[in-house]
Image (spheres, rainbow, N blue to C red):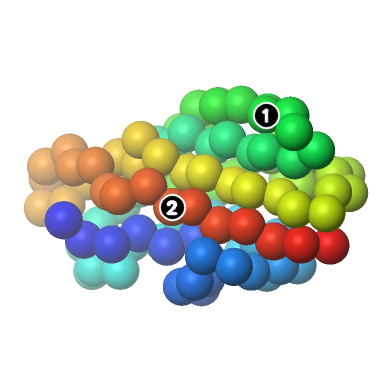
Amino acid sequence: VPKVLLGTIETTETSREKVLAYPRLIPMELGCEVTSFSFTFMANDKTWGPVNVKGAVFDEDIKDKIKETEAPLVKITIDNIHFLYNGRDMVAKPINIEYNH
């Protein structure tokens, strides 16, 4: 199964700025297209989501939530990542990242 990344982030630890710089899922294989995913955001012992998204790009609600949340530790889980690869629907491994303020 081809790997999918959040923007250009290849590690589990990142920054809010990097998440917002390129808020979309990118398959690492030519000919792949992300069709949907689920986004969950955890900060200050509270969970927001999952939010189901069609396509590869974060919607405005997700970007706003990331921008407005000030917390010592933020965890993002992106799962149920569906994509088309050679005409077949496939599911990528979940993406788990976190950042500190």
Q: Residue at x 76, y 62 (%)?
A: 100
User: Label 2 amino acid?
Assistant: Ile
Residue 44 horizontal side relative to residue 60, left or right: right
Q: Assign the C terminus to one quadrant of the image.
A: bottom right
Left or right of residue 58: residue 99: right
Residue drawn at point x = 42 percent, y = 62 percent:
5
Please tell me the numbered disc located at residue 47. 1
Dot placed on the residue nearer the N-terminal end, 2 or 1: 1
Marks 2/1: CA distance? 16 Å
Numbered mark located on residue 95 in the image: 2
Return the x and y of residue 38 as percentages of the image width and height. 47, 33
- Tell me where residue 70 appears, x and y as whole percent: 89, 49
Number of numbered discs present? 2
Question: Quick check: 56 above or below 20?
Answer: above
Q: Which mark is residue 70?
A: none
Label 1 residue SS: strand
Q: Quadrant of residue 42?
A: top right
Few, some or many C-alpha atoms within 10 Å of disc 2 (few <14, some 14-19, many ≥20)? Answer: many
Structural crowding at the residue carrying mark 1, measured as other residues with C-alpha within 10 Å and reported as few (<14), some (14–19) or many (≥20): few
Q: Is residue 101 visible?
A: yes
Q: What type is the residue that disc 1 sits on?
A: Thr
- Image quadrant holding the N terminus, namely bottom left
Q: Which of the two residues, 71 or 66, is positioned nearer the viewer here?
A: 71
Give how far across and how far down residue 47 sits, in percent: 67, 29
Secondary structure category for the residue under label 2 = strand
Q: Is residue 21 visible?
A: no
What residue is shown at x 30% (from left), y 40% (from top)? 82
